[in-house]
Image (tube, rainbow, N blue to C red):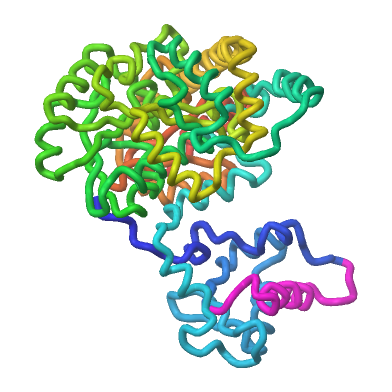
Amino acid sequence: MKPHTKTTGVVNPELSSGPPASGREWTPVQDSPLPLYKQIADYLTGFIRSGVWPAGMRLPPQRELCRQLKVNRSTLVTALGQLTALGLIEGNRGGGTKVVISPDSTNPAPGRAGNWNDYVEEGTHYPNLPAVQAINRLEYEPGLIRLGTGEPAPELLPGAAMQAILAELAQKPLNLAYEEPLGSPRLRAAVSAHLAKLGIAAPPSSILITSGALQGLQLVALGLLPRGGAILLERPSYLYSIHAFQSAGVKLGGLPMDERGLLTGSIARETRRSQAAMLYSIPSFHNPTGILMDRERREALMAVTEALQLPVLEDGAYQELWLDSPPPPPLKALDHTGRVLHLGTLSKAASPGLRIGWVVGPEPVVRRLADIKMQSDYGASSLSQLVAARWLEGGYHEEHNGFLRRMLRERRDTMLAILQQHFTGLASWNRPAGGFYIWLSLHKPLPLRTLFRTAHKAGLLLNTGDLYDRSDNRHLRLSYAFATPEELAAGLPRLAQLIRSFKS
């Protein structure tokens, strides 16, 4: 897959962030003696003169600014006219409106000098996809029903248990220093015991604590794969929605799936074609499709990769979130030669904000990744590691997972019933046996970016299939983990109406 072309992070009209967070709640005072347009002009000028909006930055679309500032378009146009007259902004046909002045000058910024936009474009790490940036921003917009969010709702998180742990730890001396490069010995011992319950034999020396599983992906991309190399993965896949590997110069090669998981017959051919250095897989409750790879397919995957001597990166984020019956053992539990790296996390069940994950693998590999991690953040939070260790040691994890499975099972069944009532004839869908997601397959292709925008105006936030496969035009990732049953009952019928409104 061709790496995503870099663009400036504030420019795309679909995801423009508007005034920075400190000013997002500002609106002009309606009964002020100062006209509304003048209040807005002064407000926006402050962002430009302070350098918060640097030369070369493109302003948000007018409709977005009108929505944020709660004014009509004519008032906004008058305000922007004031900025244009001052030489602070200029409009380009088809190119939006840009800031054209340096904060310490009354003349347009010459050429490249001092233009932060140029530096933004030159960074080696690709920006998020525009749609992903939009979702990241809109998730904090009040009133939206989040139909695709991949995290547990706040009421499903163990607030009381975490408070009890924090209160207990507060009675003892706290370690406020850095931890060892591999992470807290206490936490690694707890993770080792936890993994043993999943069938994974991993001594603490083979475990690296990370700031979430995503950091594990980034460390692997930077530390184990050659620039210009390739990694194979299921298509669609969560990995297409982020740029951890592409930013490291690694190409992605998609492999087909069926209802039993990744089709192993294509691995050898694609490995030879792309000279792939690794295979990435989410075998349990795949993101975004929710597919569970069965035992026979897992064994076939291990046999094929063994014959090819192809390392495997297993993402086990959803392994424990089964709803009907436990899944087959992780790929790492079937690994007897050290070819599988296993990623785990507490983010999907215990706390996204705790930012604790781990990488399990051969000792030389985890030491290499630990060295890179030390260069980037000098270790995950000592306090978070202490809390995570107590969480695993004290039996909180198993108890909470039982509660979470019950709640997710109820929400899954609620969503399935609503889909049956409102989407029959519009789409087909799977019945996931665990995880967070239902992969909705529309009967007809749709312009998914248009659907995203239309849904947003209707108060719905979607995760469209093109985030996980650029060529997709007929899938939505629905999540029953975040929206309440009441929100699902209100939002899904509204979504069905929007889909029906598109012409064939």
In screen coordinates, is 405 left or right of 368? right
Write down the quadrant of residue 299 in the picture: top left
Report the front residue among 472 and 311: 311
For this orientation, the residue located farthest to the bottom is 107
Q: What stretch is highlighted in magenta?
A: 31-55
In screen coordinates, is 426 left or right of 256? right
In screen coordinates, is 354 left or right of 442? right
Q: In this view, does 415 lie above or below 84?
A: above
x and y percent of residue 435 in the render?
45, 22
In the image, what residue occupies the spot 24% across and 37% down?
278
Write down the quadrant of residue 274 in the picture: top left
For this orientation, the residue located farthest to the top is 325
Report the front residue among 406 and 77: 406
Report the front residue among 271 and 235: 271
In the rendered structure, does residue 405 fall within the stretch colored magenta? no
Q: Is residue 141 above or below residue 383?
A: below
x and y percent of residue 455 in the render?
51, 44
In screen coordinates, is 56 left or right of 202? right
* Residue 277 appears in view: yes
In this rendering, the count of numbered labels is 0
Quarter of the image where the C terminus is located: top left
Report the front residue among 91 and 202: 202
x and y percent of residue 502 in the render?
39, 45
x and y percent of residue 391 in the render?
63, 19
* Residue 427 appears in view: no
In the image, what residue occupies the spot 57% across and 29% down?
184
In the rendered structure, does residue 33 fall within the stretch colored magenta? yes
In the image, what residue occupies the spot 68% across and 44% down?
142
